[in-house]
Every structure is written in structure tokens, then in C-alpha cells.
Amino acid sequence: MKLINETKVPDQLLIDLLTDAARSLGMRIRTTNVVVKIFNKRVPYGTMGTAFDCHCVRWIKGSRRWIKTDKGAFRAGLCNTTDYLWNAERLFRTARHEWCHIHDYQATKSLSWSQTSMINRRMAYDRRPEEIRVKDYIEGAENKGLNKELAYESILNLAVWLEENNKHVVKHTK
Ligand SMILES: [Zn+2]
């Protein structure tokens, strides 16, 4: 993947976790050229991630450069919390969810129009067809035994890093 890392977490820790999140779905996802941006959230709540069906993004702060992406990009946030394991797990879950959307974009099952249609706007978030599919993918993977235990190590590694570096990170965060 093409990682845009806005956090102080070392790239490799994020790449491992994001790769495991995609792998844990047991689906065909072309991860190599998907753009993934990880940012710091100031609060421990609210939207955690968003996926986009697109061919390029301009996501590097202060840069006007477009980055090509393989039918999809997503952003996900690390929270400002001292519950480190929860934070790492939440990032994993968010990434896993967004990878499902990327899967659909790449398989061109996405209904981009539905995101702007009036019908969809009136639909509750969890009733949207694309969100129901995501739920099915994750349940399907878990039923096959492909769950987050597969990513236990990368989740734990991130949690440990967050715990060891929390003070340092907070001090330097805007
Ligand atoms: Zn979603």
C-alpha cells in the first residue's frame, strides 16, 4: 500500500497491522497501490475511517501532488486515548472495514451513485447496501476462522508502542 503516515508511529507497525487487516478478510484485495492515510484524532470518538472510490488522491499535507491509487483509498484515525490496546484494535477493525469497501471498488460492485442519491441519504447508515455487504464479508471471514487473532501480534505491537511513546507523542501533537 502507499502509506501516508501523519502519526509518529513507525511506518512498519502500521503497515503490518493494515496488511493483517486486509488478509484477515480472506478476499482478493489488491493492496499494493491503495493509498492509506493514518492520522491522529484528538478525541476518542466519532468517525474512525472513510473509504473513497477514486483513482488518485491529494492527501499529503501541504503538497499539491496527486497520488495514483488502485481503485480506492481510505483514511483511518488513531485516537487520543490511554487505552492503548483498544486504540490499536479499533484501528484494526476500522481498516478491516475500509478494506471491504476497497474490495468492492476494485471489483466494481460499488454503487457510487448511491452515495449521493436521495434514497441513500434517507437510509440509515447501517442499512445501506454497501455497509450490509461489509458486515457480511466480516462475518463470513470470522465464520471461516479468519478473525482478528490472525493479527494479534501486529495489534499488540502497536499497542505496546503507543503505551511506551504516549507521553512523547502527546507532547508533540498540535
Ligand atoms: Zn463503511
Image (tube, rainbow, N blue to C red):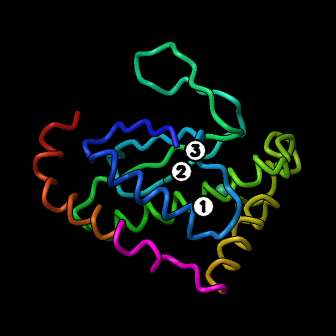
- Ligand 1: give its quadrant: bottom right
Of pointers 3 and 1, the one earlier in the residue sequence: 3
Q: Identify the magenta region.
A: 144-154
Q: Which residue is mark 2?
A: 49
Separation of marks 1 and 2 at Cα, in angstroms: 8 Å
Q: Secondary structure at mark 1?
A: helix
- Image x and y of residue 85, in percent: 30, 70
- Left or right of 8, for residue 36: right
* Amino acid under disc 2: Gly
Q: Secondary structure at mark 3?
A: loop
* Amino acid under disc 1: His
Q: Which mark is residue 116?
A: none
Q: Which residue is mark 3?
A: 32
Asked whether the residues under the numbered discs 1 and 2 touch, taking CB atoms below 8 Å apart as contact, a structural biologist would say yes
- Image x and y of residue 105, in percent: 76, 47
Q: Cβ of disc 1 within 8 Å of ligand 1?
A: yes
